[in-house]
Image (cartoon, helix red, strand yellow):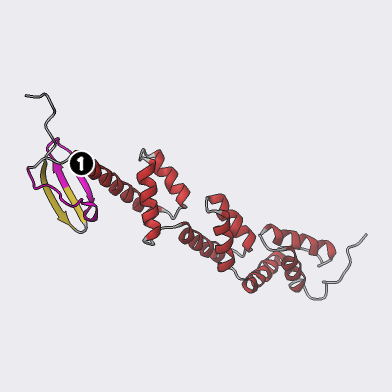
Amino acid sequence: MDGTEPGIRLLSLDRGDGEARLALSDGTVLELATSSLPTGLPACGEVLPAAMLAALHEAAVRKQIARRLFLELDRRLRTRADLRSRLLTAGFPPGPVDEVLERFEETGVHSDRRFAEAWCRDTLRAKPVGRRLLADRLARSGVPPPLAAAVAAEQLPPGDEAALARTAARSWWRRQRGVADARALARGQRFLIGRGFPPGTAADAVRATAPAGNEDEEDPA
């Protein structure tokens, strides 16, 4: 006897619905995508070469990561950075995590663009805000700033932004008391700027929606 450890053998291989389940002689059961099965896989009962065994374990880890990602995305749409952080915290190794996230983006399953588009649509349905607010919130959530700005611009073109600013201004005026004097106009503009609208767009919207007959009254001394 040369004292070397006996190799690990493939005991069984079951395929179905794009997944494969391998039982090994050391008691390990690996579940992975059938597309990850290596070429030249030994027949059941034969020893698995060390490099192939390592590749099978890595594929099984990627499968676990993909399952965890689908579970996270089923609960809530998240940015890539958020998903990566959650996977690393769960103990998955960085390399396979990045590989699976990249694969998800390549196949259209998930990407920061998809997250940003969905988030913008949901936010705009909830309340009228400007592009700057959309872009800033997306960037703070982990979307790369250039992508955040691009998606915000796509989801809210200038004409739509001006219309939303007027909607927000009308809502603001309904909550006010008193005349639409210069001070009120300035307050309304500040409110809209805080909602992410450009200063010029905010000023136009507040003045255009001011209560009739009060727009030009001066603020009392």
Span of residues in magenta: 22-45
Pick the front one: 187 or 130: 130
**x then y, percent, for residue 59:** 26, 47
Q: Who's the residue at 55% across and 55% down the image? A: 138
**x then y, percent, for residue 174:** 70, 67
Pick the front one: 155 or 188: 155
Based on the displayed image, in which of its 4 quarters is residue 125 positioned? bottom right
Tag 1: amino acid: Leu
In the depicted structure, whether residue 205 falls above or below residue 48: below
Image quarter where the C terminus lies is: bottom right
**x then y, percent, for residue 18:** 22, 58
**x then y, percent, for residue 13:** 12, 49
Residue tagged by mark 1? 53
Q: Is residue 20 magenta?
A: no
User: Left or right of 166: which side holds 150?
Assistant: left
**Which residue, as the protein is rendered here, is positioned at the far right?**
221
Pick the front one: 75 or 106: 106
**Which residue, as the protein is rendered here, is positioned at the far front?**
2
Image quarter where the N terminus lies is: top left
User: Left or right of 141: which side holds 59?
Assistant: left
Task: Describe the element under mark 1 as helix, strand or loop.
Answer: helix
Based on the displayed image, in which of its 4 quarters is residue 162 positioned? bottom right
In the depicted structure, whether residue 88 falls above or below residue 116: above
Q: Who's the residue at 40% across and 40% down the image? A: 88
Q: Say few, some or many: other residues with alpha carbon within 10 Å of mark 1 (under 14 / 14 to 19 / 20 or more).
A: some
